[in-house]
Image: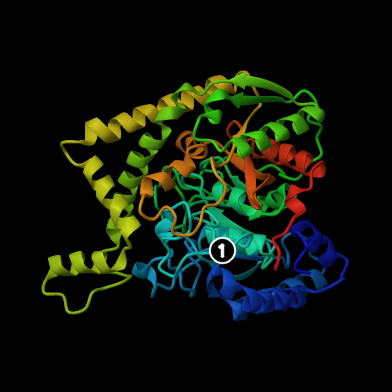
Amino acid sequence: MHQMTLAEIARGLADKKFSSEELTKTLLARIAQLDPQLNSFITLTEDLALEQAKAADARRANGETGALLGAPIGHKDLFCTLGVRTSCGSKMLDNFKAPYDATVVSKLAAAGAVSLGKTNMDEFAMGSANESSYYGAVKNPWNLEHVPGGSSGGSAAAVAARLLPAATGTDTGGSIRQPAALTNLTGLKPTYGRVSRWGMIAYASSLDQGGPLARTAEDCAILLQGMAGFDPLDSTSIDEPVPDFSANLNTSLQGLRIGVPKEFFSEGLDPRIAELVHTSIKELEKLGAVIKPISLPNMQHAIPAYYVIAPAEASSNLSRFDGVRFGHRCEDPKDLTDLYKRSRAEGFGPEVQRRILVGAYALSAGYYDAYYLQAQKIRRLIKNDFMAAFNEVDIILGPTTPNPAWKIGAKNSDPVSAYLEDVYTITANLAGLPGLSMPAGFVDGLPVGVQLLAPYFQEGRLLNVAHQYQLNTDWHTRSPAGF
């Protein structure tokens, strides 16, 4: 049963080939057996999962249907979950049990999804490797010596290792798409505002967006259907009708205009990945797509702009973790200043501290105009580049990452080299666009992804292109040895 996709599980449950309770018990046993190798979960919720599975079976027995009804999933550990530890991968929140469900959690629970637990992640979603977690690094199931990508690396590793069919993630600068690429999954970052951020612990509020990680585009469509929708509790949620994301999966790609930016093929790109991207382009051409060279001239400024804006917002968002109301508190503080200083120094790891310091500096009185304001101007130029490109093409295609997964610890002494791994993904966050990564081959036995970008609220088009590609290739069907 563990090899089934979400779509296959939905059909199996509908045909009464197995129950949600049987499936849930099977996957919980598999997690207990295999996850010690991966460290992909922070908290397992066995009792809750079995309770939800029994309830889903009862709903089906009463005639209710639904693609997610009884389907097991996992949640990235920054979605607040009532009564369950929600740690954000940090010592700061190691003892925090959320007093409510995030909107994403409650929507998926209402759809009948069964939550098996909370997945490991980079601390406060800051990282590209899932090495900054207080609970230890997550291992890539394709090679246990390598990273799975971050910050949604726990969700990605768990799905890739067939511990569960799909999981939620969040994407601030590529944190769904990058781990999807490094673990042979399909991962989708929706349009900013498509999925509610209420109850999702914030890193950078103007960039964060929740989305699905699964093995296929079809499965991402099913999970996104349960996650998306307007939420009055979230001031950044957009009141846009939610289409049936599965409705147009089988639409022909005949005449689809795909733009390929020349800036995506710079000297930092591994030539073997470039070759796989070109192979993917040829496959899409066979399906009727028309390829057009385009330019995104301001992409070169994306990394510096992002690493001013995101830390600035993080320094503001993380100021609430002060040892007073919730989270880690130091022992025997001398006074209030000592409480603040020691609680934050003890609770936050090095990467989080680094970004808070950078962000506070960029927002300080003497430097706000020189750094933060300039970064926001670059952000607008990047958005304008995309708007101009989408006047000429329907979809933009390129590599998801410049390199395959690197060895655990290889970039620890050089954080900037890890930041550069997000070079192709962060532009979508800066512009608020939807983006998808899909499996496209292997380099040295490690998976490689191809990224698709679309205009606002065109998630259905991304899923359509990825689904048609997956009907004609088999990369997404391959699973790591031993799992």
Location of residue 410 (image quadrant): bottom left
As rendered, which of 472 and 330 lies closer to the eye?
A: 472
Name the amino acid, label 1.
Answer: His
Residue at point 31%, 63% (across, down) = 348
Q: Residues within 10 Å of mark 1 (few under 14, many from 20)?
A: many
What residue would you read off at disc 1?
Answer: 75
Locate the N terminus by quadrant: bottom right
Residue at point 45%, 60% (across, down) = 131
> Residue 360: image x %, image y %?
24, 47
How many numbered discs, if any? 1
Location of residue 364 (image quadrant): top left
Does the rendering let one see residue 105? Answer: no
Does the rendering let one see residue 19? Answer: yes
> Residue 323: image x %, image y %?
25, 69
Residue at point 27%, 34% (across, down) = 371
Q: Residue furthest front?
A: 444
On screen, residue 272 versus residue 343, left or right, reads right
On screen, residue 149 versus residue 11, left or right, reads left
327 over 305 or under it: above or below? below
Location of residue 159 (image quadrant): bottom right
Locate the C terminus by quadrant: bottom right
> Residue 426: image x %, image y %?
47, 39
> Residue 202: image x %, image y %?
41, 54
